Image: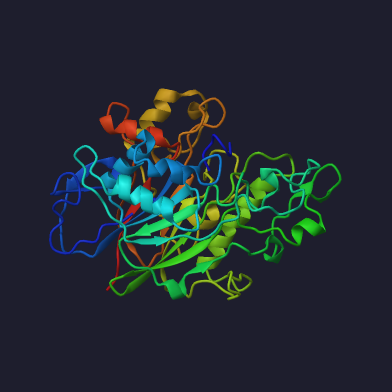
Amino acid sequence: MASSHWPQSCLMFFGFVSGILASPNLLAIQDSTTVPVDSVHEKTVRLATFNISFNRDRAGMLKERLAKGKGKNFERIAKIIQRVRPDVILFNEFDYDESGESVQLFQEHFLGKAHDNLKPINYPYTFLRPVNTGVDSGLDMNHDGVAKSGEDAYGYGKFPGQYGMAVLSKYPFVEKQARTFQNFLWKDMPDALVPIDPENAKPYYLVPVMEVFRLSSKSHWDVPVNIEGAVVHFVVAHPTPPTFDGPEDRNGKRNHDEIRMLADYVGGKAQYLYDDKGKHGGLAEGEHFVVAGDLNADPVDGDSHESAIEQLLNHPAINSSAAPKSKGGTAFAALQGRKNSEQKGDPATDTADFSDRTVGNLRIDYCLPSKTLEVKSQAVFWPEPDDPEADWVKATDHRMVYIDVVIPK
């Protein structure tokens, strides 16, 4: 989630690709630079994850503002999408509305209109489902004696659907195979990292709370995409930030187990998992997938629970031999200094620009493909400070992460 609240993409090439990017003979890859397309006949798809910070303070506000058809940050986000041109993209922090009008308005007024020298982009398919943020639990989740604050919801939020998710695609979804895990209970995960209150060595969440506590702070989705007959499972989530808690590390442990849920789902260890329709288990061995999202865990820096993201980065079914990078990440870390100068991770892999006084920039957004998919290229969209396009990233404290994968015939 954005630090102000809670202190990677895929062209298909058939014939010619002229007009797809700003320059007709170029394909954007590592470090937001371009290289000549060496083949226009490969079946390559670009998938992306992007926390766009389309969250507002009350229900309906996002829709109201999008309906006006103007807004600098809306345009900035649209420009980034029109520049990178993913085929399938996950939005994190997109306030949910059941009608889907907000997504339609963003498509109509911003993605569907040319900005600068960029061409419009259209996503005919949208996947939207409810999330846990802002859904009242009726219980005192944060031990403040009150059961009506945003922290007492199943996922932090001022109203149901705040900080929601949306998947947009140029390819149709296999709706009958789509699965959501909004209601899976934390207590039903074997060997869960139950928070312990260090003052009394007892569970932080008492039995009445754990009996209803949903593990996913937003939701976990398996969105199968039909790419001309080949199905790729877009497995997405937005785990809670591992911050804003106490020595019991309740959010850090929840973040760890939300990530573990993803790892188990794609790794044959999900017999315990049940989806919102009651179906048990995870992906079958050999399925194509991409795990994506703002996962709020850096492999080296930050304050996530020990080995949280390593559950995916070291996963035997995931191709994580390389990390998407940008030149901008390195340049901005050096320019901003402070906390960034103390970090051990490679700043080129950073995907979020957080407070330089307290957190520093981190790698927390991921597009992680299965080993069944060949990765052609990958990048973080983060232009260098002197690049005019650097202005676009001011719209959000996260950067788009995208990968190009070859889909086996």
- Give the percent coordinates (x, y) of residue 393: 37, 35
Residue 381 lies left or right of residue 7; in this view the side is left
Q: Residue at x 15, y 51 (%)?
A: 19
- Image x and y of residue 119, in percent: 21, 46
Q: Quadrant of residue 118?
A: top left
Please tell me how many numbered marks the rendered image carries: 0
Q: Position of residue 207 (x, y in %)?
A: 81, 59
Q: Is residue 305 left or right of residue 201?
A: left
Classify the position of the C terminus by image quarter.
Answer: bottom left
Drawn side of residue 409 relative to residue 244, left or right:
left
Q: Is residue 282 above or below residue 390?
A: below
What residue occupies the far right of the structure in this picture? 200
Q: Can you give x and y, in whole percent of width and height, for residue 286 in the image?
A: 42, 74
What residue sits 13% from the left and 49% below the top? 25
Q: Nearer the viewer, residue 152 or 103?
A: 103
Image-based side of 150 in relation to 370, left or right: right
Question: In the image shown, does 18 or 270 lie closer to the viewer?
Answer: 18
Q: Nearer the viewer, residue 270 or 17?
A: 17
Q: From this viewpoint, is residue 137 visible?
A: yes
Query: Who is closer to the viewer here, 105 or 356?
Result: 105
Q: Coloured how? A: rainbow
Q: Is residue 329 visible?
A: no
Q: Residue at x 36, y 48 (%)?
A: 106
- Quadrant assignment, res 408: bottom left
